[in-house]
Image (cartoon, helix red, strand yellow):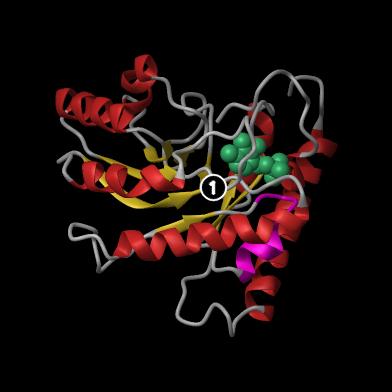
Amino acid sequence: MSGEGRAETDDVVERLLRTRELIAGLTQVHAAERSGMRDPLLLAVSKTKPVEYIRAAYDAGQRELVEKARQLPDDIKWHMIGHVQSNKCKQLLEVPNLHLIETVDSIKLATKLDDVCSQLNRTVDVFVEVKTSAEETKSGVEPEALIPLVDHINACPNVKLRGLMTIGHPDPNEVVSCFTKLRDLKNLCMARPDVNKEDGLSLSMGMSGDLEVAIQLGSDEVRIGSAIFGERVRKGPPSG
Ligand SMILES: *Cc1c(COP(=O)(O)O)cnc(C)c1O
């Protein structure tokens, strides 16, 4: 229990249940704008939190998570939301219940994933991470480079494009433009010849601080960390 004890895992469960209620409520409030859309999926983001916290969330029915796959049950669907380094692709793709990589941001990375998948005889579902604000530190592909990347992925036999992901701007006044941009870019992508028209493309946008705007603007997946697992401990850059 890494010395944290029962009270803290109970807190995780309580915050998880509250977050689910909040998402359900916001989805209703914005039902008109969201008409015809799927309900947003809640992805619980554990960052560096202990395995016990994740297990508590898992026991409360949460099956979409990130990180620490080896020590936890195999019906968890792991989403990679951190930056993917080329030399880590194999390790990542060897996780049997890796469900989705949300952070493909270059043609080079897509090619690498395709090659490793072919060695491992598997396919992988991906989102492209898009840089929707001009902040220097932001990861993701520039909007201008998105369509060539999408076309490239659609030509990779082992890499399946399922959606787009973005991290909003820390300034709440900028977030609307980030999420609106992602939505518009999705529509452009949907018009490409080889995109899977039947399943469409999902939008992964919204975190603890900008959940409502994201849901209002049509998010299919919100990635919630601190609102469930507690405040982040700042230890270097965030990892997926
Ligand atoms: C940490 C992180 C989140 C969750 O952020 P919170 O503000 O703690 O909800 C979501 N997406 C990415 C890419 C992250 O790194």
- Is residue 85 rendered to the left or right of residue 214? left
Q: For the point 64% across and 45% down, which residue is it?
A: 57
Counting from the top left corner in percent of width and height, residue 27 is at 63, 73
Q: 120 or 185, which is in the foreground?
A: 185
Q: Main secondary structure of the magenta part?
A: helix
Residue lying at the far bottom in this picture: please name it.
Answer: 32
Q: Which residues are magenta?
A: 207-216
Q: For the point 25% across and 67% down, which residue is it?
A: 197
Q: 86 or 190, which is in the foreground?
A: 190
Q: For the point 51% across and 82% down, which residue is it?
A: 35
- Quadrant assignment for the C terminus: top right
Counting from the top left corner in percent of width and height, residue 119 is at 16, 23
Displayed-image quarter of ligand 1:
top right
- Examine the rendered structure and indicate whether residue 189 appears above or below residue 87: below
- Is residue 103 rendered to the left or right of residue 47? left
Counting from the top left corner in percent of width and height, residue 174 is at 70, 54
- Examine the rendered structure and indicate whether residue 42 appears above or below residue 24: above
Q: 138 or 32, which is in the foreground?
A: 138
Image-quadrant location for residue 47: top right
Counting from the top left corner in percent of width and height, residue 111 is at 24, 29
Image-quadrant location for residue 54: top right
Task: Give the crowd class for mark 1: few <14, some 14-19, many >=20 residues within 10 Å.
Answer: many
Q: 101 or 64, which is in the foreground?
A: 101
For residue 45, say whether it is visible.
no
- Is residue 1 rendered to the left or right of residue 149? right
On the image, numbered disc 1 is attached to which residue?
Answer: 166
Q: Amino acid at mark 1?
A: Thr
- Quadrant assignment for the N terminus: top right
Which element is circle 1 on? loop
